[in-house]
């Protein structure tokens, strides 16, 4: 049996910082940037079959589910070789456990467990959402990808429902789906996780590693579409980089609100 490893990709938030304004600047990046945006060494399928387990406790009209679907559609229409198909859920779902199926769920308090985000998934309160991937060590092939939203310490909204101060589901979903398809986070200078190739002006990218609750932008930038080409159409480099190197793509918010 192949040995498995896993890694998580997180989207955190700033309290009290709004990017505001209108995004009039374009983001210019070179080829090195595009290459570096992929999760190096990992082999990720361009197709994603998933089950939607449950939505946010703040949203009851189904628009959370719709927002996730809209986000998938933005990626797949920007990049025709990507696809995502939803299938009915079956069997048991346990957050954080591998079960052979890709699953998307909001993680909410239950009667037994008031904070499963922290106590079951072991994630900080300041993380909005996370993609967890399981990787086959021998091949670096990603064999399972789950997406979880923090429904414990974070609230959510869409255009039609949710908490007034909540985060915009489609924005966060769009970012996380970028991880599902093999892209990593980018940051601006001075932020934890920043590396020289990232340059600056990255707050306009979907894969920028922060969001605020005022942020309703949800568009795949041409830079990110181009970066996906390096995920799927360049010669893979299995074993060139151990999975541990993914630590560089993990992010924990350094400050609390
Ligand atoms: Zn991220």
Image: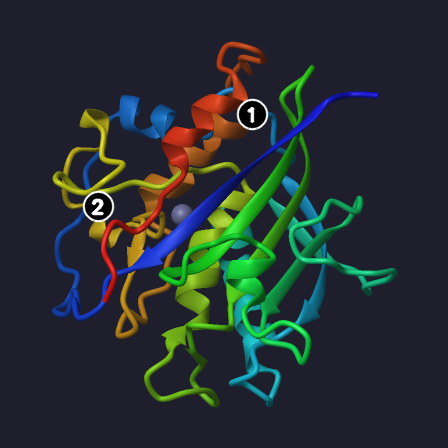
Q: Is 196 above or below relative to 71?
A: above
In the rendered structure, the answer to whether residue 65 lies left or right of residue 170 reads right
Residue occupying image coordinates x 45% and y 71%: 169
Q: Residue at x 45, y 29 (%)?
A: 246
For disc 2, the marked residue is 202
Residue located farthest toward the top when viewing the structure as drawn? 240
Q: Is residue 27 visible?
A: yes
Rendered residue at 22%/35% (across/down): 194
**In the displayed structure, does residue 46 sit left or right of residue 40?**
right
In this rendered view, identify the residue nearer to me: 72 or 144: 144
Q: Earlier in the sequence, mark 1 or mark 2?
A: 1
Residue 16: percent from left, percent from top = 17, 71
**Quadrant (top left/top right/bottom left/bottom right) for the N terminus:** top right
- Answer yes or no: disc 2 within 8 Å of ligand 1: no
Quick check: is the Cβ at mark 1 less than 8 Å away from ligand 1? no
Q: Is residue 20 above or below residue 186?
A: below
- For the C terminus, give its image quadrant: bottom left
- Taking depth in this image into account, of 177 and 121 the one nearest to the observer is 121
Mark identifier at residue 42? 1
| Of residues 204 and 78, the one drawn nearer to the viewer in this rendering | 204
């Amino acid at each position: 049996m192949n040995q498995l490893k896993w890694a998580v990709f997180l989207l955190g938030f700033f309290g009290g910082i709004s990017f505001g304004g209108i995004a009039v600047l374009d983001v210019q990046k070179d080829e090195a940037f595009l290459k570096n945006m992929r999760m190096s060494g990992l082999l990720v399928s361009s197709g994603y079959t998933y089950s939607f387990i449950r939505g946010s406790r703040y949203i009851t009209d189904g628009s959370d589910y719709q927002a996730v679907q809209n986000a998938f559609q933005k990626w797949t229409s920007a990049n025709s070789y990507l696809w995502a198909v939803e299938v009915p859920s079956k069997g048991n779902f346990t957050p954080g456990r591998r079960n052979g199926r890709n699953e998307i769920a909001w993680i909410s308090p239950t009667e037994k467990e008031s904070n499963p985000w922290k106590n079951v998934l072991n994630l900080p309160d300041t993380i909005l959402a996370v993609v967890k991937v399981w990787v086959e060590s021998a091949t670096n092939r990603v064999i399972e990808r789950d997406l979880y939203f923090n429904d414990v310490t974070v609230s959510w909204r869409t255009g039609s429902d949710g908490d007034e101060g909540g985060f915009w589901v489609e924005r966060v979903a769009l970012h996380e789906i970028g991880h599902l398809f093999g892209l990593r986070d980018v940051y601006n200078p001075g932020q934890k996780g920043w590396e020289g190739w990232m340059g600056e002006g990255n707050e306009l990218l979907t894969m920028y590693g922060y969001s605020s609750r005022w942020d309703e932008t949800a568009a795949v930038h041409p830079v990110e579409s181009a970066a996906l080409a390096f995920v799927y159409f360049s010669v893979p480099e299995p074993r060139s980089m151990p999975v541990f190197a993914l630590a560089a793509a993990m992010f924990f918010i350094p400050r609390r609100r």
